[in-house]
Image: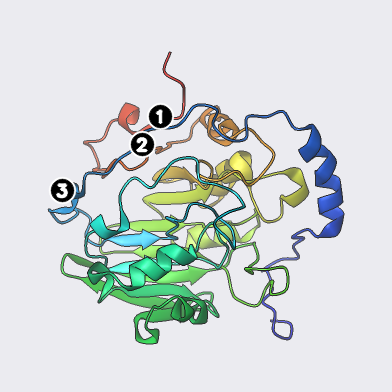
Amino acid sequence: MAGRQFLNPVPTSVGGLSVAFKVLPQFLSNREERTPKTPLGPFTTDPRSYQSPPANGLRILIDPVWDERAAPVQWAGPKRFFPPTIALQELPRLDAILISHDHYDHLGAGTVRALARMPATAKTRWVTTVGVGAILTGFGVPAAQWTELNWTDSVPIAGPDGAATITALPARHFSGRSLANRFETLWASFVIAGPRHRVYYGADSGEWAGFAEIGKTYGPFDLSMLEIGAFHPLWADIHMGPDGAARTFRAMGGQGLLMPIHWALFDLALHAWRQPIERIFSIPDLKLWSPVPGEPTEVVPDQTMDRELRSTWWRPVS
């Protein structure tokens, strides 16, 4: 840390007024389809699918945002492309809720307030990063239910159907729910390690050399969830984009499945909304998993075919 501010693992530019001045002309002249012209879906999740326990053990909800907008207010700001696939009140009992950092597209205020009051979360362990616990408490989550992690800290999670360990690891990003409090809470990526499987959740991060060490120390991973959207060369230090995700996946060992995330819900950049997923689909030799939103899916070794893994739900039906 430097004073009250957390630091990235390597020198990182997160942008400021100078970047805003560079982006403004591009924003004004932009003609990309940044939000879907045709409504997506409908995507729905049948709550009855949760009546039987998951084959892989725990139920962990990651960075929940049921809010209409990823913004401080719900009357302005980036609006979601399609409604939530299931009502919060229809969620099953949750073993853990994981919050990677405090940005609005990862921590929805209205969502957390609602989750904190639900019977399904009465015994849920909330896992987050240093400094974010106070935000959760402000939204109604009892302090006894949340655990803050620094980088390389771990916490065990147990439920009726399984157990795992969640470990926080470095990411190259930043935090803050306003321009006045950037870097005052920590951001992280995470490993979820169970008795049979290991999952890496990259959250938000630019590329950096530490990914190779993460793969070597904590892998191999059965599933790596890496962001591909909200990218631009002007802020490449904090968002890796599809090509960066492919390089990062390979740097971590390239084993298991790569699940592209952070691209199909909010307009947070200048590129066309489909561009990140189409680009990563064009990169050869990647075993991608792109499930249909809201469709309960479990990847079972030797039973799941490649064509089932690579859904193209975002493409218009001709």
Q: CA distance from mark 1 to mark 2?
A: 6 Å
Q: Amino acid at mark 1?
A: Trp
Q: CA distance from mark 1 to mark 3?
A: 23 Å
Residue 11 in percent (x, y) is at 76, 65
Against 64, residue 126 (above or below) is below
**Residue name at image x 39 percent, y 50 percent:** 223
The label number, if any, that marks residue 313 in the structure image: 1
The secondary structure type at the circle numbered 3 is: helix
Mark 2 = which residue? Answer: 292
**Residue depth check, mark 1 versus mark 3: number of the one nearer the observer:** 3
Residue 28 in percent (x, y) is at 79, 37
The label number, if any, that marks residue 48 in the structure image: 3
Q: Amino acid at mark 3?
A: Arg
**Residue name at image x 77 percent, y 39 percent:** 27
Of the residues under marks 3 and 2, which one precedes in the sequence? 3
Answer with left or right where residue 234 lies relative to residue 94.
right
* Residue 124 sits in quarter: bottom left
Of the residues under marks 1 and 3, which one precedes in the sequence? 3
* Residue 303 sits in quarter: top left
